[in-house]
Amino acid sequence: MRRLITGGVTALAVLLAAGCSTRSDDETDSARQNGPTPQRTQAASSDFGTLKDVCGPGTAGKSSVQGVTDDAIRVGVLTDVGFTKKSEFVDTAKVFTSWCNDAGGINGRHIEPVTRDARFTEVRQRTLEACKEDFALVGGGAALDSLGVKDRLTCLLPNFPAQSSQIGAIGSDLQVIASQPSAGYFQYPGYYTWLMKEKHPGSARKVGVIAGDSPVTKVMSAQFEEAVAGLGGKVSYTDLYPASGVSDWTPYAQAIKKEGVKGLVFLGDFASLAKLEQALTSIDYAPDWIDANSNAYGPAFPELAGTALAKQHNYAELFATAPLESAADNPATRQAIDLFEKYAPGKEVTYPALRAFPAWLLFATAARDCSTLTRACVYENARTTTDWTAGGLQAPFDLTSKQPTRCFTVVEATADGWRPADFEPDQGAFRCDGPLYKYEADYGKPATLASVGKSLSDLT
């Protein structure tokens, strides 16, 4: 499932991963999971990119709100780290809150992140725990995030996620995501228009889709098939592969070659994609393009794909997020990397980490501007934000709109790693002339406050 983002690929990556860990909920284990907070020897800069005074000292005053004391704000960080072994949301929480707290916190209150490890299947349990203890959920995400949405709405817990994956969660009430996805819309129209009409116009009528065999990814496959057609292309080949894995990808490669697939959409984990591309290379076949999806963005995929990248052409769209490779020209990206080096040395700055930073920045600035810190104030400040760029980490996004941004960012994989693709950006690292595509089929609706007998007036 895409990082859907990353509605979906992250969800699929989790689905096809394996792992386990123990989880503790008390403050000691939370501190152990998030790591020690560096000693505060001097005040840190309070600016991030173009955002001024994100954090800083102040007189917070009294509060009786859950998760808020005179000197601290307790927030939950939803993650599947116990299943995926990927700690990017936990790492980003440590980095951001350490930096913010060193600068003085939010009007003098330090942020205390608590890891809520859903371990893939325990989303509802972790949400119920957050309902009892946390002020809000910030900077996280879980593959099966819709499992906890109704509980979150029932307890009126706002969520500022790094990503949202499932239809029931994407666009749900009391959730403000710092950029896409948007409920009811295809998330990559600009990217696919560029692939099919500009970069490789001969591929439009010969698009293939391979997805992991799960109920969620089957829906995603249908969404991509509809969107490709709606953007002027045609899906001529579809297939599923077992979620448990494939020992020999040669039959899939042969089917792709037989059908003459020119553009391949891969909705799965990048390790499997690397094996498929090796099989394609061994039979001397290469589509014009492969959408490796943002799940593959990072050093691991090029290493696994190896020599196949000399023949196969991989691209990914990053939800209009500035890529790490733009750091030399993008101060906000450079600052995020520097903060990781300071507060979490040795930890990798991943794409999910780049997605989590805008969520934390949005929460912090929304809370900063509340004269009295309440959930209602923070939620209202966040959802009425326009032209949000997270200090330059992403293209402008209007959080008051129900539509996705028209901006997109494309990277391509090479033997030397990922690099920005030649997609003619017109606003820094972004291109902002993409079309919109609203689904015609009904794939489900996001959860609402009304569905649990609540309304926005209940939020305090």
Image: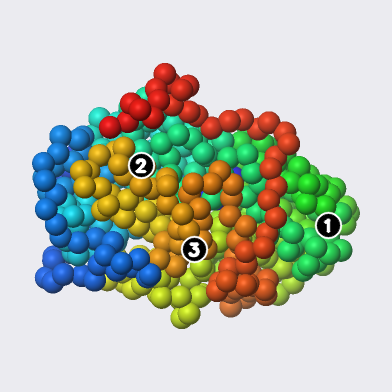
> Judging from the image, what secondary structure is the residue with disc 2 in?
helix
Q: Mark 2 and mark 3 in contact (Cβ < 8 Å)?
A: no
- Separation (CA) of disc 3 from disc 2: 21 Å
Percent x, y of residue 71: 12, 49
Q: Is residue 73 left or right of residue 297?
A: left
Give the residue at x 70% y 55%.
435
Residue 181, compared with residue 450, is above or below; it is below
In this rendered view, identify the residue nearer to me: 250 or 131.
131
Nearer mark to the viewer, of 1 and 3: 3
The answer to whether residue 357 is left or right of residue 212 is left
Rendered location of residue 72, percent (x, y): 16, 47
Tag 2 residue: 379
| Residue corresponding to mark 1 | 204
At 27% from the left and 71% from the top, the residue drawn is 342
Return the mark for residue 394: 3
Badge 3: residue crowd in 10 Å (few <14, some 14–19, many ≥20): many
| x and y, in percent, of residue 377 in the image | 30, 42
Dot 3 falls on a residue whose secondary structure is loop
Q: Which amino acid type corresponds to the residue marked 3 in the rendered image? A: Gln
* Cα distance in 3D space between marks 2 and 1: 42 Å
